[in-house]
Image (cartoon, helix red, strand yellow):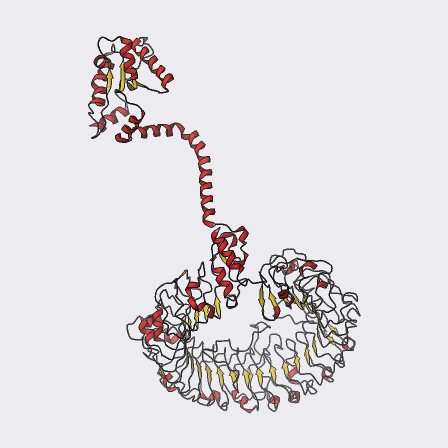
Amino acid sequence: LIPLLALALALADTNFPQFLPCELQPSGVVDCDRRSLGCVPSFAGATPTALANVTALLLRHNHISHLQPAHFTHLGSLRQLLLRWNCAPTNLTALHLPCHMVIEPGTFLELPKLELLDLSGNSITSIPDLPPSLTSLVISYTMILALDSTTFSGLRGLRSLYMDGNCYYKNPCGREVAVPPGALANLHHLTNLSLKYDNLTSVPRGLPASLQMLLISSNRIISLSHQDFAGFPVLRVLDVSRNCRRCDHAYNPCEECREGYPKVDPDTFSSLVALEGLVLSDNSLGQLDPRWFQNLGNLTALDISENFLSEDITNTTAFQSLAKLKKLNLAFNYHKKVSYAQLHLAPSFQNLTSLEVLDMTGIFFRSLTRATIQPLLGLPSFRKLLLPMNFISKAELSIFSHFRSLKYVDLSENKVTSVSNVTSVNRTPAARAELLLGLERASQDHPPTSEIFMPHCDSSNFILDLSQNNLVTIQPEMFNQLSAVECLRLSSNSINQAVNGSQFSPLTSLWLLDLSQNKLDLYHSRSFTELPHLKALDLSYNSQSFQAHGIGHNLSFISHLPNLRYLRLAHNQIYARVSQRLFSNSLEALDFSGNLLSSMWAEGDLYLRFFQGLSKLSRLDLSQNKLRTLPDQALDHLPKSLRLLWAKDNHITFFNWSSLHFLPSLEVLDLSGNLLGRLATGHIPSSTQLHTLNLSRNGINFIAQGFFTPATKLRVLNLYGNSLKTLDRGWFGGLALSLQELDIGANPLHCECDATFLDFLLEIQAAVPGLTNKVVCGSPFPLNGKSVFMQDLRLCLDVRLACSCFAFSLLGTLLTLAMPTLQRLFGWDLWYIFHLGLAWLPWRVWQKWKASAQSYDYDAFVVFDKAQEAVADWVYNELRVHMEEGKGRGKGRQRFRLCLEDRDWLPGKSLIENLWDSVYSSRKTVFVLSSRGPMVSQPVSGLLRATFYLAQQRLLDDKQDVVVLVILNRAARKSRYVRLRQRLCR
């Protein structure tokens, strides 16, 4: 009880988290997301002041199925309540498990200041009573299938209503969601309404005139008329996409649009004078009617992707009145199974004087010429052109030099092999385009990389993306008139050539070049020297040439790039026959991950100085190099300017921490994903500048006392995902309270009764991320995987005592079951073995026992029938000789004293007196009898009878059984036992 009492007193003096099992975030937000809660927490540990300051309660992705007024009575200041995905409809769960959410009357009326309520993803069939203060309501992916005028009575201030996904293929209902005319007419302040995926067949009528955003996509509306959108004078965004779909290569279940549909009246959008964004994608539109856009002078964004407009965009006049349009999406308007030799945009595109972004992804044309985008050349604000996935094999790149403000051209995921001046203007159908990618395309931007080792191109004046094409060689002519390009991406091509310093000569302004995932041969010392402003170079994933045996590789070109600051040589399998040292006076960041530095450093001193010549290097990544240690000699030869060192995901089992003095400027060290196991040897030098140390996923199960104490500037320590069973203040010394972040999540902490780490955790709780849900117990078993705060001190058990009690109870149970079973099956054998073992005890022990019992004159009185000569002969010549003289016995065997009638009886005494003395002066009485056949009727000797009666009397009087019977048989001449005995005795 003493450890338990000490822990309780310590916890009483600390600032215990008030909102367990949730976490209090800044601005009064209580985060209870993804905590497997079965009910709304009561927050019994929170003070009334703390409860009054709660403004938002997040209860998303739990298992709450019952709500009642008592759950929220103490949260009078709550403004946001998010309850999404707690009790999902059956068809929206992974295992199709039934669940029904119960919301008792008046539950949310206890929240008089509630403004946002999210009930999406729950199996509710009706809208509960809501407070009049509500401004935003989300009831998507529920089972609510009807709205009427009384549904929102009293919600005069409601501004946003989202009711998506209540009836579609994943959440079927067999009918459409009913929104009768005037059902929402009383919501005079409603500005945002979303009714997507509700199986609607027409636009609801009688909607509030205050609407600014109306989303009715992914329904079954195939006809639009002027009356559908009349009366929306301030509507700014309208989405009617995916209502009459084209289903070739659809990414989800799709119903093909009927022939002759959709039907869109010419004046459908004429009353939407304030409209700024219009989405008509995936509606099987074959032609654009210019009358649709006549009154849309304020339109800035138009999405008409995934239709059948590949022909229409070459001659349409629909864009003549859209002078303010900034973004136009024409993606995936391809003709089924057809790609075109060329594509010419209609002249009306030149009327889009405000156009900034044009997406022409997936229209399928094979040649890009000046004529293709001629109408765009004069647009003063045009800055971004997207042309991926068009099967373009020939591209005239010089045409981009004629744009005044163009900053980004995306030609990725095409089939560009060369550039040429294409003069043909025929638009004839050609090759089949059956290998289409999904219509939902990922981001066109380059895969994100850490800006620590490679900057992004966002700040560039001109970005050209030619990644994922079929380029094999690079010729300077490809980039003629493109001197303004500052960022060029050529990743994921098939470039297989030795760059010699001439390939990119026209690109005089280039500062970032991405050549990753190619087959470059780095042989020439003048590679890339034609780029005087090159600052960032990505050569990662070019391993083919480095894996070729017997071929040397020259990295000396780095020293000839005076402005190079970022270099990626990652995942090239570099291990031998490369330059022994790198030299650069400008390089600041080097990514050398995914190589075989372990093999390089194993070659004696050959590559130990590999990085020493990088005098300004401040960031180095050595991850995934199969390193088992970081040798002191190698660390000593790293640049002294190094501030960040990553050695993640290696096989490091030992690290000499005192070697950090070789890196006096090091501030960040990442050793995550290794095999350190124990932090017991070496000490961090007190002179280190280290402020961030990542030791996550190392299997660490022991940390020596005071290990981190010398690192006085350490502020961020990551111990996530190790095997620590406790957290000791002694590891940190006075550093503990200076830590800004200490991540100990996913460690199997031992939450026993005398654990003191909880007190320490509470002291530094502001520095521990995910304290209430990621810091979990690993033992004892009932608490495995649960928060360290789930332990109830009132039910605290001593694990060692519990294990001991369990072991003893188990042993007792097994013995109780085993004894009767053994007695029943092997009782006689065990009794015999016991007495046999007792008979063979050492003579001193036996003597001690005999002396403590009683002193006898003889060990045995031998009585037999002297008339039987064979018996007498055996007694005198066999039994007496072996027992008294010890013949035939092992050395040290005991000699017994026998009492014989002819030798030891005293003359002058009567027979009965001698017989009495012999029986009572001997420990045992041995009766030697001979076997009598069935035909023999010789009577038993009277002496034997009298002796037996005296022995029996002794049993009755003294409770001592002294009778020993020896029955003699004639040896069988052919007995196998006798013959075996004779052989063993020879």
Q: How many discs mark residues in the rendered view? A: 0
Point out residue 43 in the picture as x, y percentages from the top left corner: 61, 60
Picture residue at 48% right of the left edge, 62% below the top:
760
Foreground of the two, 229 or 344: 229
Residue 881 place in picture, x, y as percent: 20, 21
Q: In the image, residue 344 lies at what x, y percent?
A: 61, 86
Question: Is residue 150 depicted above or below 975 in this figure?
Answer: below
For the residue pair 743 and 985, the one nearer the viewer reads as 743
- The quadrant holding residue 375 is bottom right
Where is the C terminus found, in terms of image quarters? top left
The answer to which of 190 and 732 lies nearer the viewer is: 732
The residue at the point 61 percent across, 83 percent down is 358
Image point (45%, 43%), residue name = 807
Vertical placement of 808 versus 234: above or below?
A: above
Residue 733, given in percent of the width and then of the height, sits at: 42, 66
Would you say 873 lies left or right of 359 here?
left
- Tell me which residue sits at (47%, 47%) in the image: 802
In the displayed structure, does residue 946 sit left or right of residue 674? left
Residue 309, by quadrant, is bottom right
Whether residue 380 is situated above or below residue 646 in the rendered picture: below
- Left or right of 502, for residue 276: right
In this rendering, does residue 700 appear at all? yes
**Image quarter of residue 391:** bottom right
Whether residue 250 is visible to the viewer of this picture, yes or no, is: no
Is residue 862 depicted above or below 708 in this figure?
above
